[in-house]
Image (tube, grey):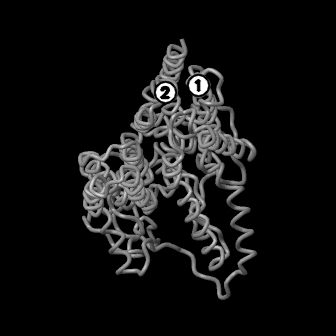
Amino acid sequence: MLVMWSVAIPMFRGPDEADHVSAALYWSENHDWPGFKEMYLVDGVLEARVASGYRLYMESYVVLPSLTAADADEVRIDLSFDELGQEASYRYNKASQHPPLYSMIVGSVHSATKDLPWDTEMWFFRLVSVLLVCPLPLVAAAMARRLGAGPPVMVASALAICAVPQLAFVGGTVNNDNLLAIAGAWLSLGLVSVLTGDLRVRTAAWAGVAAAVALLAKAWALPLVAVVVIAYVTAGVREKSVRKAGVPLAVFSGISLVGGWWWIRNLFLYGTLQPSGHREPLPEPVPFGEAAMTVVQRFNGLFPTRFWSLMSIKTGTSAYPQWVPSVLILLLLACIVFAFVRAKRIGVKRTTLTVMAAPVALALLIMIGEALRFAITTGIASGIQGRYLYAYITPIMVIGMLGLSTFVRRSVRLPVYVGVFAVVFSLVSFVRAISYHYGDSRWANPFSAFSDLLAWSPIPGAIVVCFVIAVVGCAGWALREALIIRS
């Protein structure tokens, strides 16, 4: 499914994709990382954006209403990024506010693919994200197993990861959220291991490696790392032994500092953990009440869709009516509440569930607080993104499936219910996305849109068709396996 999205979505339609591609090219060429607001987009990337269907309008790049086969013949350029230009442009690259690890990984691919046409090379960049994200369902299943869940909940947890189309969409694009998602998943597995009594130094070591990678991916790793420390303290209280928890905590903390140095550096250089903000402040700050109302309205209007199914559909419309993602958010929240209420029945301590959910709650508080700060200083409540929670997607879904298992009368039916929802929601979302991005008009006929998709594809159309067939076949296989578990 990730590979399918990597081919189907037009280039540069992923969140901040131009910034991350440019940062990878910059790293490959220069092998250094400028400070905040000191890196500029590479000229070749801006040229490639135009060739992907963007147009420069009033100093901003706007996308064409739709992409057709005729558009492909007119604007596509079969040149490499290097041939399009490696000089710095006049536009800031927002990726410079993040650590460089993801750009280093993608930039290392450039040395092997730099002679390819830009769109084909960018597809290979996207495949890096695919490889990073694809283990998420297995990590979710392992987490459920660690909590004592049986096969139905394990499989449902894995399938629940596949039930978030926006996660698969972002996973098929060039974005550092993907490195954070997999590192956060492994770190969350370490968190659960500690909470369930695993205080071995070996576990602390691999959890520390995951933490170091996460910290060198994005700032949203910080809440999760902090909660892992809390988990060791919780385990020490349960064991009534400082030594049993203190030694692995020291090992975890020491290895984590391999990535944590970046944030200590930011404190010395900028006086803050995460320098951000690319808009100039207003002459007078916005009143608190007005700013808070702006944040509430934008959060309610944007967050559910951006978590479930944004898919770069941003021009005044969306793939689904607003109530659809909002209801899904409420259902997931209800499942999490069920897990807490019936913790004794599912055999998991409430303190364990609380610590597992703590990074999500902390991240939401930070997100809302930062949006409020931006709203007061700039008048715009920016920074409200559902994908920021993908660092904690595995514990979210595992807790939700544990709660749902207590609601379903026969737990063996759980994988079937979740699997059917995942398959239907994902395939419908895929059809909605391509019929928006391709065709003669917004929401074109999906069959006509698919032919236009093939015209824009960075790889041969026959391979794209094979990917689609493979996704449908694998979906059927997954449902068959769920039915076998039921029987």
Residue 229 quadrant:
bottom left
Instruction: Out of 358 and 163, give the one closest to the viewer.
Output: 358
**Total marks drawn?**
2
* Amino acid bearing label 2: Val
Tell me, yes or no, whether the two marked residues, 2 and 1, touch with CB atoms within 8 Å. Answer: yes
Q: Residue at x 35, y 68 (%)?
A: 87
| Relative side of 459 to 401, left or right | left
Q: Which mark is residue 414?
A: 1
| Relative side of 335 to 397, left or right | right
The residue tagged 2 is: 155
Q: Position of residue 353 (x, y in %)?
A: 52, 46
- Pointer 1 local density, CA inside 10 Å: few below 14, some 14–19, many at least 20: many
Q: Residue at x 40, y 46 (%)?
A: 182
Q: Residue at x 30, y 47 (%)?
A: 199
Up the image or down, 412 lies above or below 310; here it is: above
Q: Position of residue 279 (x, y in %)?
A: 57, 76
Instruction: Out of 421 and 35, give the one closest to the viewer.
Output: 421
Give the secondary structure at mark 1: helix
Q: Position of residue 449 (x, y in %)?
A: 61, 34
| Relative side of 440 to 216, left or right | right
Q: Position of residue 84 (x, y in %)?
A: 37, 58
Instruction: Out of 274 and 277, give the one closest to the viewer.
Output: 274
- In the orientation shown, which residue stands out farthest toward the bottom? 283
* Amino acid bearing label 1: Leu
- Pointer 2 local density, CA inside 10 Å: few below 14, some 14–19, many at least 20: many
* Residue 327 visible, this orientation: yes
Give the secondary structure at mark 2: helix
